Image (cartoon, rainbow, N blue to C red):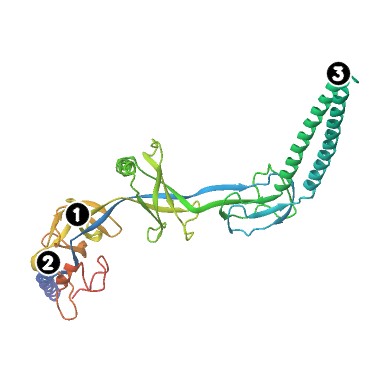
Amino acid sequence: MKKRTLWITLVALLVVAAVGYFFLGRSEDKAAAAGRRALNDRPIPVAAAAAQHGDIDVTIDALGTVTARNTVTVKPRVDGQLARVGFQEGQLVKEGDLLAEIDPRPFQAMLDQANGQLARDQALLANAQLDVERYRDLLAKNSIASQQVDAQEALVRQYQGTVQTDRGAVDTAKLQLAFTRIVAPLSGRLGLRQVDVGNMVHASDATGIVVITQTQPISVIFAIPADNLGAVVKHVQAHEKLLVDAWDRDGKIKLASGTLLSLDNQIDTTTGTVKIKAEFANADNSLFPNQFVNARLRVETRHDATLIPLAAIQRGTLGTFVYVVNSEAKTVSTRAVTLGPSTADTVAVEKGLEAGEMVVVDGADKLRQGAKIELPTTDKGKDENAGAKNGAAGTPGRKPGGKRPPSP
């Protein structure tokens, strides 16, 4: 009997516990649902900026390679022992500057020998010319045969040819002696020295003594899509100068500005691009040969375009759209837009937005159509929406697209 009573008591306790758990769980679910509804109704803090009228450049970006305008491998023009090197590696030189010198003594000896031979043959020529004058006088007196006069005149012409050959040998020896002084064939920057003093150098050496690259001015070669070729050719044919900027690999620092120099004469069928060469003064030597840069070709400038920060652009099933802040800055609505040219942080809107309208630039990841929003306020509690007319967005001093302000 006691055992039966115990079982009945246990069952009753289990029933009471189950009923309590059921009602308690429903209460907690209702509370959680109410909390979620309250959270969803809570305004979402965002930063906004006003669309403005302004100018924007239409550019074509491409990866380019810096190329020296001229590159020369300085080689000796005569064989000999390198006696002196008169340059520092990396030095800037001008055309005609002395770079190195080969031992000139063997070539000076050759010149002396050529001069001696010339003097000897000139003396023989002078003597033969005197003899031919005597023979002509004797021939006029019928003292000798005309054949002897003809032979002497032929000997004179022979000596004249020998003297002319000797003079050529002297000029060659002088030239060979001059070639022992190795000078810069153009102005530019020197590379690393390829041979040390004391080594024998030859005109047939492949490496040469040093390499000179002409870096002022310097060129950048890059390729643009063939679809953009028409806009570029139109300006080139009109003899307009197109500006080209060279940026670093990250696209954050502008290295130099130049102009378009020439276009290639054919399209690369493999890549569907055409090569372009731009020229830069490079007065500060910020560009080095074989350096990779981001080339930005400025095709035209569009005036009075509707501009918004690039951070405002969203993409989804609607395509490209923005969140537009409704009147009194209470809610937002989605708006499909058609984009035009863009820069690193600004984009032109060709359709779908008017100047003066406010768009969300930060905090858009939590928004939806009709969502309630809250714009940051100043310390005095004034709505920063009023400052958006000047292009301000969010808290003063903070750029659009920065960190989201803390939730209230």
Element type where label 2 sits in the image: loop
Question: Which of the marked residues, 2 or 3, is nearer the chain's N terminus?
Answer: 3
Residue appearing at x 64%, y 51% in the figure? 183
Q: Dots 2 and 1: beta carbons under 8 Å?
A: no
- Residue, x 78% and y 44% (percent of image)? 111
Q: Are marks 2 and 3 in contact (CB under 8 Å)?
A: no
Q: Residues within 10 Å of mark 3 (few under 14, many from 20)?
A: few
- Residue 27 placement (x, y as % from top left): 10, 71
Residue type for callout 1: Val
Q: Secondary structure at mark 3?
A: helix
Question: Residue 64 at x, y = what percent?
Answer: 42, 49
Q: Secondary structure at mark 1?
A: strand
Q: Is residue 9 visible?
A: yes
- Determine which of the numbered discs, if any, sits on residue 372 in the image: 2
On the image, numbered disc 3 is attached to which residue? 147
User: Residue 353 placed where, x, y %?
Assistant: 14, 56
Of circles 2 and 1, the one toward us is 1
Q: Residue at left 53%, top 47%?
A: 70
Q: Which mark is residue 40?
A: none
Q: Which quadrant holds the C terminus?
A: bottom left
In the image, 277: left or right of 312?
right
User: Can you give x and y, in whole percent of width and height, for residue 293 in the image?
Assistant: 42, 54
Query: Disc 1 versus disc 3: distance between alpha carbons?
Result: 104 Å
- In this view, the residue in front, 33 or 290, is 290
- Which residue ends up furthest to the bottom in the rendered image? 380
Name the kind of residue labelled 2 in the image.
Lys
Q: Is residue 45 visible?
A: no
Residue with the mark numbered 1: 349
